[in-house]
Image (cartoon, helix red, strand yellow):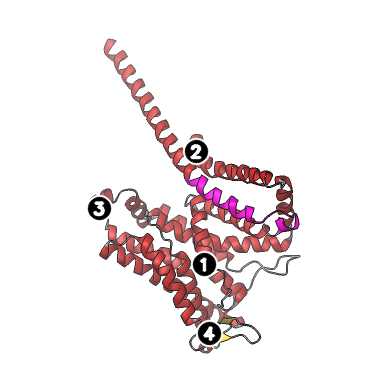
Amino acid sequence: MSRINPRAVLLGLAAPVGALLFAAAFCAVVLAVTGHSAGDAVDAMVAASQRPRTFVNSINSAVQYYLAAVAVAIGFRMKLFNIGVDGQYRLAAMLSAALAGASFMEGLPSVLRVAMTIAAAMLVGAAWSGFAALLKVTRGVSEVISTIMLNSIATFLVSYLLNPDRLALENPGSNNVSTPPIGVGGQVPGIPVAGSSSDLFGLLFLAAAVGVVYWFVLSRTRFGFELKATGLSESAAVASGVSVKRMVVWSMLLSGAVAGLVGMPQLLGSSYSYSLDFPTGIGFIGIAVALLGRNNPVGMALAALLWGFLNNTSNSLDISNIPREIIGIMQGIIVLSVVIAYELVRRYRVRAEQRDVGRALGRTKAATAEEVSA
């Protein structure tokens, strides 16, 4: 077994930890300039995190952020930037909600209903990302452009379908519309937490399983090796007999399939229908979480927990008369600084490796000279 390299571990932690410290220091300066106390902000957020309801909401948010991050990370491994996770999961959630709430589903066993809903969401997500993959391999269209456009198309398509004349129902007494409610047999029970009125999402374990599968496929299978190899060097992958186009299609399909799962914890564990107030923007948070976690399953889990904590404790800042927008500033600074930090760490690692090689060559030459003289 290979030994753990302390320098490699420190370099791996330097970028995210440095980004967090820099973002915290920057926000402290902003608070001081605006006449607020950074200590009061930290005390308010820590106090909020100790409330059971805030704890539950933070974990639930982290579950969705993690799934979105894994979807983005699959593309990142191939040097593909899937910005369309947001549109993929919303379209998948809407159509799978319509399926789960259909009348013919009522007579089916609960396990089968849930499995069909999740499978439908994954298929819709994969199909929607598949359009971007086909455009890239057949016409050379950048996935960045195509997925951005597909986000807009998905938004308008959901708006079109979420209509009482099509797949939605009106809610009496409000302007909201939603898909037919999912019955008890199609729901996933939550995990009760003492002192909290809301439960942990039951699909928390699904997110954990996705992380394990992501790690296993990329680290322990030939497909994962070919995926990473293609992302590192397409020419080298082609020379090894790997089809770049095939890997592009597969990586986008897998990314879209995981993206389809993003809305499932909320849909099957809390909302039980897709409506106008269904959570949006999770796909873009997934990009930040994947960057901060460096596409590592454990790193992304920690980053998702951090994002969930920040988002769900921001309301407590209002009580201390501190603008909650400081959380958004901190999140933005984290994303910007972590990108810069990763590049600085990469350059330092390259220089360090060059120095090590130079020292090794110097010792080899010295030893050879001694042998010749002897």
Tag in front: 2 or 4: 4
Location of residue 307 by image quarter: bottom right
Magenta stretch containing residue 334, yes or no? yes
The residue tagged 1 is 262
Residue 176 x %, y %: 60, 81
Q: Amino acid at mark 4?
A: Ala
Instruction: Rate crowding at label 4 as few (under 14), some (14 to 19) or many (20 or more) other CA atoms within 10 Å.
Output: many
Indicate the amino acid at tag 3: Val
> Residues under labels 2 and 4: Cα distance?
51 Å
- Magenta-colored segment: predominant secondary structure: helix
Q: Which residue is mark 4?
A: 168
Tag shown at residue 238? 3
Q: On the rendered image, what quadrant is the N terminus found in?
A: top left
**Considering only order in the chain, which callout, 4 or 3, is on the residue closer to the N terminus?**
4
Please report whichever mark, 1 or 4, sits nearer to the chain's N-terminal start.
4
Q: Is residue 130 left or right of residue 160?
A: left
Quote the CA–CA distance across marks 3 and 1: 33 Å
User: Seen in the image, is 131 located left or right of residue 35?
Assistant: left
Gap between marks 2 and 3 measured at Cα: 31 Å
Q: Which residue is drawn at the image coordinates 46% and 81% (left, top)?
A: 160
